[in-house]
Every structure is written in C-alpha cells, then in structure tokens.
C-alpha cells in the first residue's frame, strides 16, 4: 500500500461507525462486558473449549501466560472469524519472546480511537513530531503521514540545533516519543540551552509510550518543558490493558478498554508493593484473552495508587542471596547527569553490569559515584560493574532494550 492510500485510510477511519462508537464509550468510561458476555465470546475459541472453560465469574478462570500462546496462536483464534480478514502483529521486542497476535479491522479502529484520546488530553490542532526509533529514507527527517518523523539514530549534540529548527519550521507543538530517544534529546537540548545557544521550543504536549518512563526521567522532562502536558501511555501489542499518567500523577487504568487485575508478587521496592498486570480483553473478538498475565509490573502504594509502571518480567535481577529484585535503581540525579542512556545486563547470579552511553563530560568520578550509589541501593548484595558502550542493541521497531536478563528467573521464584 502506497503512502497516500495509508494516509487517507487513517483519515477515513475517523468517520466510521466503529470509531464513533469507541469515542462515545471512552467519553462515558463504559466498562467492558460482564461475565456472561465474556463467556459468549470465549466459547467460540478452541483453546478455551479444550481447557473446559464453563460459564463462570471471571476471577474463577485460570490465568494464561505468553507461554500458553507461543506456538499455539491458531488455537486462540475464534471460530466465528474468517482468518483472511485478520491482521497479524508480531511481538517480541523488549521481552524477547516472539508471539503472533491476530486482530480484526474493528480492533485496529478501536486502537486508533484510544490513541487519539490520549492526544486529546494535550489539546486540539496538534502538529506532531515523532521521535520513536525512526529511520528516515535520507537525512535526519522526513514528513510523512502528516507528521514530522525525526531520526532517533543520528541524534547528537552537534545536530540537535537542526532538530529544533525543524520543529520550529514545521510549527510542531506536540511530540510523540520513545522515552529512551527523548531522554537523549533532552540531555543534548539542556546542554545547548545552558550554553545560551538556544531557547526551548513552544511545545504544548508530549506523549510518551511503548517503553518504561521512569519517574526521574519524567521530572527531567517537566523541568525542561514546564509549559507542556506530559502524557505517559502504557499498553502492549496484546491490548490486554491500557493506562495513562498525566504529568507526575498516578497511572489510571481505563476500564472501558479491558478488565484489569493486579496480582501480588510478594516483592517490594522501597515502600511500594510490586504487582503484575493481568488483563482480560474481548473487544478483539478474533483473539480474546482472558486473565492474561502481561509480564508487566506496577508499583503500588499503601492506598492502592499506581505509582509507576516498572517494566517486564526480564527486568528483574538476582542478588548474591538468590533473591529476585526489580531492576529499578533510584539513583540521584547528579549520579546520572553525564549518562545519555543505560542498560542493565545480568548473566551471573549476584553480578550486575550497568552499560552506559555517556557524554564527553563523563569521567572516573561519575563511575565511582555510580558504584557507590548502586552498592548502597543493594546493601552490598550485588557486585556492580560499569561498562561504557558506544550504543545499544535495539528491537526491530527501534525500541531501547532496558534490561537483558540471561538467567532463568523461574529458578528463583
């Protein structure tokens, strides 16, 4: 399909009855279907029939995992849906496990409605620049699908002024970003601003998605763009759950999108409990998922508020006592000042390699500060190594892989 067909198809979707229906449902925050409706959908699915699912309350159904689906995707497709009308989406990315998910046209339209709802929290008449692992055909940008697409791979302190000039030239007022790419952009931009060579562009809003947006990075963004509304949108290819955080607020899971539960892990991070996100979605009637364990985790305070999304199953590490810990290190801002991006790597129990991409100011003092901060955080129960790298391996979609865990974490649960 050529460029213009894709462009106009995206426009036409907004006038379909399905799109208008989902807009109304989002506005009313209408809950997804009840237990009876869930059963009516899943009884058409071979996997659930073979497992003996009967009409019951949703909490009485067993949970399913990625391992139940991997290599068995066809069993999750409803008998009532013709396969020739389905879209296939492959996921793997940051979790490393490749799965195929099948969607109807209706599901594609639904997702468009929910994405646009997130943008609407920023405002109307948005002119959007995208910094999400893009590789323009040539140079550092291209204008496509009505958006300015900026290269995530060629970004440097030397050319950040070119990026700003493009943002101003195309009158961009909204940024759609991967957190990893945008943090590097912000680091370079801050240095240029502090040197007195540039002012902050007039951005009214920033939408972050597809990667974990850490609290410390949120604060950095809001300080650099104090006038902008920062939206962090959590979701996944499986469409099992959707949550949004505005600025530094709590994450709110959308009950009109799916039914969500939080499964206790018994783990804590500082004063917060860590729970796994479990979602049920039947809007995608081609491949409904019931009590699907996403492998994503949240931090929950004592009042039940969702403080943050902290990543996937592989983003846990094992200390010298063979204890499982979330890979969230609350390092002080000064410690990370000269680090552009980072990655955690573990292949040995009790040993954590902290891989960092750094700026020209990084020195042995920074390395020493990192080691002291991490040793304090882990109470000496983890051997820490700092490794400076030129760049990181990314997913095929250009996402930053935040943690690489080579150990089988099931051995430590």
Image (cartoon, rainbow, N blue to C red):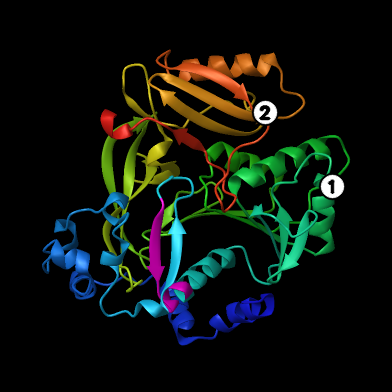
Q: Position of residue 380 (x, y in %)?
A: 43, 12
Residue sitting at x 52%, y 66%: 115
Instruction: Report the side of 58 relative to 153 (left or right).
Output: left
> Is 105 a magenta residue?
yes
Label 2 neighbour load within 10 Å: few <14, some 14-19, many 20+: some
Instruction: Report the side of 222 relative to 190 (left or right).
Output: left
Q: Position of residue 67 (x, y in %)?
A: 29, 50
Instruction: Report the side of 194 relative to 91 (left or right).
Output: right
| Residue for badge 1 | 161
First along the sequence among labels 1 and 2:
1
Bounds of the magenta segment: 98-108
Instruction: Report the side of 231 relative to 34 (left or right).
Output: right
Label 1 neighbour load within 10 Å: few <14, some 14-19, many 20+: some
Give SS at disc 2. Answer: loop
Residue sitting at x 70%, y 46%: 153
Give SS at disc 1. Answer: helix
- Viewer-side residue, 386 vs 205: 386
- Viewer-side residue, 241 vs 93: 93
Q: Give the Cα distance between marks 1 and 2.
A: 21 Å
Residue sitting at x 54%, y 64%: 118
| Residue for badge 2 | 337
């Amino acid at each position: 399909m050529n460029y213009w067909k894709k462009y106009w198809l995206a426009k036409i979707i907004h006038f379909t009855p399905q799109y208008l229906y989902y807009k109304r449902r989002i506005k009313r925050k209408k809950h997804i279907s009840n237990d009876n409706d869930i059963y009516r959908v899943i009884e058409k699915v071979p996997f659930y029939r073979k497992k003996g699912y009967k009409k019951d309350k949703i909490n009485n159904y067993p949970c399913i995992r990625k391992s139940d689906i991997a290599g068995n995707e066809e069993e999750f497709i409803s008998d009532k849906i013709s396969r020739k009308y389905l879209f296939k989406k492959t996921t793997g990315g940051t979790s490393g496990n490749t799965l195929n998910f099948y969607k109807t046209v209706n599901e594609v339209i639904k997702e468009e409605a929910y994405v646009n709802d997130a943008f609407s929290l920023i405002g109307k008449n948005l002119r959007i620049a995208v910094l999400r692992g893009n590789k323009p055909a040539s140079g550092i940008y291209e204008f496509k699908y009505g958006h300015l697409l900026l290269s995530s791979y060629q970004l440097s302190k030397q050319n950040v002024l070119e990026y700003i000039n493009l943002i101003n030239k195309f009158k961009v007022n909204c940024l759609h970003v991967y957190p990893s790419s945008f943090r590097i952009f912000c680091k370079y931009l801050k240095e240029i601003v502090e040197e007195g060579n540039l002012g902050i562009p007039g951005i009214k809003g920033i939408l972050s998605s597809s990667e974990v947006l850490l609290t410390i990075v949120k604060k950095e963004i809001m300080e650099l763009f104090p006038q902008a509304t920062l939206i962090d949108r959590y979701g996944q290819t499986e469409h099992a759950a959707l949550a949004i955080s505005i600025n530094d607020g709590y994450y709110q899971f959308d009950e009109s999108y799916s039914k969500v539960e939080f499964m206790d892990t018994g783990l804590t991070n500082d004063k917060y409990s860590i729970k796994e996100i479990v979602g049920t979605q039947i809007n995608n009637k081609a491949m409904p998922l019931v009590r699907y364990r996403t492998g994503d985790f949240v931090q929950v305070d004592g009042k039940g508020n969702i403080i943050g999304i902290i990543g996937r199953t592989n983003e846990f590490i094992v200390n010298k006592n063979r204890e499982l810990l979330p890979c969230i290190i609350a390092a002080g801002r000064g410690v990370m000042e000269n680090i552009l991006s980072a990655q955690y790597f573990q292949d040995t129990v009790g040993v954590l390699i902290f891989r960092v991409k750094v700026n020209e100011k990084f020195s042995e003092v920074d390395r020493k500060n990192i080691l002291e901060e991490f040793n304090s955080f882990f109470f000496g129960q983890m051997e820490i190594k700092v490794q400076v790298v030129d760049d990181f391996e990314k997913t095929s979609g250009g996402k930053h892989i935040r943690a690489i865990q080579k150990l089988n974490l099931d051995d430590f649960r």
